[in-house]
Amino acid sequence: MEFALSEDQRMLQDSLNGFLKDAAPLDTIRKIAVGDEAAAASLATGLDEFGLAGLHIAEDHGGLGLGLLDACVVQEALGYAIAPSRFMATTVASHAMRFAGEGFLPGIASGETRMGLALTELSSRRDGAGVMVENDKLSGTLLLAVSAEGSTHLLAADISGALHVVETPELAVMQTIDRTRIFSEVRFGGQMSEMTLNPDDEVLAAARLLVAADTLGAAQAMLDKAVAYAGERQQFGRVIGSFQAVKHMCAEMAARLEPSRALIWHAAHALDTGEPEGLVMAALAKSHLAEAGTFIARTATEVHGGMGFTDLVGLHYWFKRIGVNRQLFGSPEQCRHDAARLQGWFETA
Amino acid sequence: MDLSFSPEYEAFRQEVADILAANAHLAPTSDDRGMKNPKRLAWQKLLIEKGLAARTIPTEYGGYGAEPDILKSRIIAEEFARSGLPRAMSSQGISMLVPTLLELGTPEQKAAYIRPTLYGEMIWCQGYSEPGAGSDLAALRTAAVEDGDDYVINGSKIWTSTAKQADMIFCLVRTDPAAKKHEGISYILFSMETPGIEVRPLVDMTGTANFNEVFFTDVRVPKSGIVFEANKGWQVANATLTHERGMLGDPNATKGRLVELVDMMKRETVNGERLIDNPLLRDRLLKLQGEVYAMQANGLRITTHNLKKESAGLAGLVVKLMGCELNHEIARLAIDALGELGVMYEQGEHLRADGSWQARYMYDLGLIIGGGTAQIQKNIIAERGLGLPREPKLAKA
């Protein structure tokens, strides 16, 4: 029995953290947030060299053959640096196609096929949105697509929950609070479904787990910044971190975050090994990290006092990333509802 | 990441399950009351002989004498939980005094005390906290003054569980009032039958006297009761305090309570609707389930660190704070779910689960405060886990 990251996983995370520290400092993120395409492209190229596109694709199809736990380790590092990346979309699409994607997976692994995710139909259908399929042709709109911008193809859910791999149609940017990532409205006008996959709880579970891992990283970054600030900032002639009021805020953040890390590992491992509890754990990991992340986003900002509220310190980029993650692929309430359903806790349905 | 057990361990698991199944008829039940109930003592003896209690204590002191093996301990705990049979005794004598004596006791102390303690024949109480020394334990003032081969003890202790039943006490006393506060304390063992000791039950909010006050008036005890050395009691006590905090907040016990809560919410109906079908209550239940999963996974992580003989760092430091809080919240939801009947207590035909949810809700608040308050735990997390500075000491007046 060993419940820990492997040496390889630790090395992967360390090297990614090291790379992102240099390649994606806050100044670079600020540039990307106002639409500096060169900065975004340069960061994406650097990340490509880690082979992330094929991380969760079988070696037979040109990938690294690694699991969701490895993917969570990567996503945590990306969340820590609030780096934009196609990694989440690529990994979820690879997961969806893991049994049937021979046609697409080699292209995804090589980076030639770039995937986006249009999955809001799986968790929250809206009036005026929704995709219909007739004769394998998709029509309608999907909201809040992830990494659709710059993609060649989308993994898109129709109103029945079936998934389609389809060429990326016309997009419109949906401006969210989080400018570290671009979200899109997708407008289908008769694009052909190139592959149809049956509804599958695992796809949403993988997506939610990666969002939770992203929040874990972002929340850890906010906690680290709060602790560093509390150890430097002086008031009343002493560092504020020596006041119990401030110290206890930091302790509460750590106490909520540290077990969350183990929860993500356990959920990812359970999905990787096909344990039946994996789906429930992934849904609860998403809701749990949403709650812990929200608490930390707020509390870490408060530890910074007035400076936490300013653009100067830039904490708000992490705050907003966590804020979007909380809703993405299902609010905490929605995820808990799904966890109850997966456990058969409803009398009917 | 590998959560499977090797064939050796799976075989061990089967062995433990077989032993428990074969002896289940000998297990004491809630009707077998009293700490020295013959059935309880016989069960403890059986568990020690089979290697399911006192497992790693050397045979010369009455233990089973196995090599320490964290996975086997874990398997034993899991199999007890699965079988529903009563576990081995876990008194303060067994969990705190025995490890201390093994490490620091004299040969005479080890020979005299370890075996009867393990077998449940000798009950101990812990004399640490005082009315004026709670979180600041080192401020304790109970005085032990040398007189020939004896100490004469005056003062009082509080929060002393099992003092009424105890044969013996392991006690912190001030032997050098002139020394700095951590350097004048001794850890001493003596009989609770010594003249001059008065035990007064301390009834708490649950309505039960889970704790006592103990008063010492000219209590004359032999110096041979000192463990390790006089005035080194703070180090002796610290070795086992860490142990006590590890015991509080066990995630497997918390999981058991959550399972009970889920069962209750599936069984109990209000207005013809199962409690679990109420979306507001269900949402709260799932929130707690997420936290239970997190604490369980955190526990697996700590086990792995222990196996590698590494510190578990923050993962370990947060267990008491988060685990006790979570237990309290589980009880709170159970009471809210039961609604008006959730307030029933102690007896009556409408009582649910023997009123245990109210008892736990209150007792768990005691555990949030006891064994190092939640606020002291936060100081520890912030200072040892996050490296924040200690509160500056006030200049002496």
Image (cartoon, grey):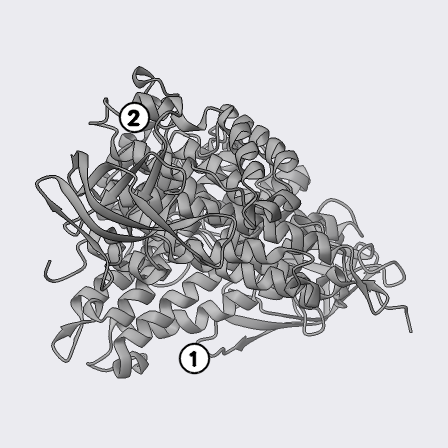
Q: From the viewer's perspective, is residue B293 above or below residue A265?
A: below
Mark 2: amino acid: Ala
Q: Which chain letter goes with mark 1? A: B
Seen from the viewer's position, the closer of residues A190 and B6 is A190
Seen from the viewer's position, the closer of residues A49 and B57 is A49
Q: What is the tally of numbered marks visible in this picture?
A: 2
Residue at x-position 26% and y-position 58%: A124
Whether residue B291 appears in this view of the structure is no
Q: Quadrant of residue B82?
A: top left
- Disc 1 designates what residue? B207
Q: From the viewer's perspective, is residue B45 above or below residue A124?
A: above
Cα gap from disc 1 to disc 2, whole angstroms: 46 Å
Q: Quadrant of residue A116?
A: top left
Residue at x-position 24% and y-position 34%: B18
Residue A60 on image: x %, y %: 30, 15
Q: Which mark is residue B11?
A: 2
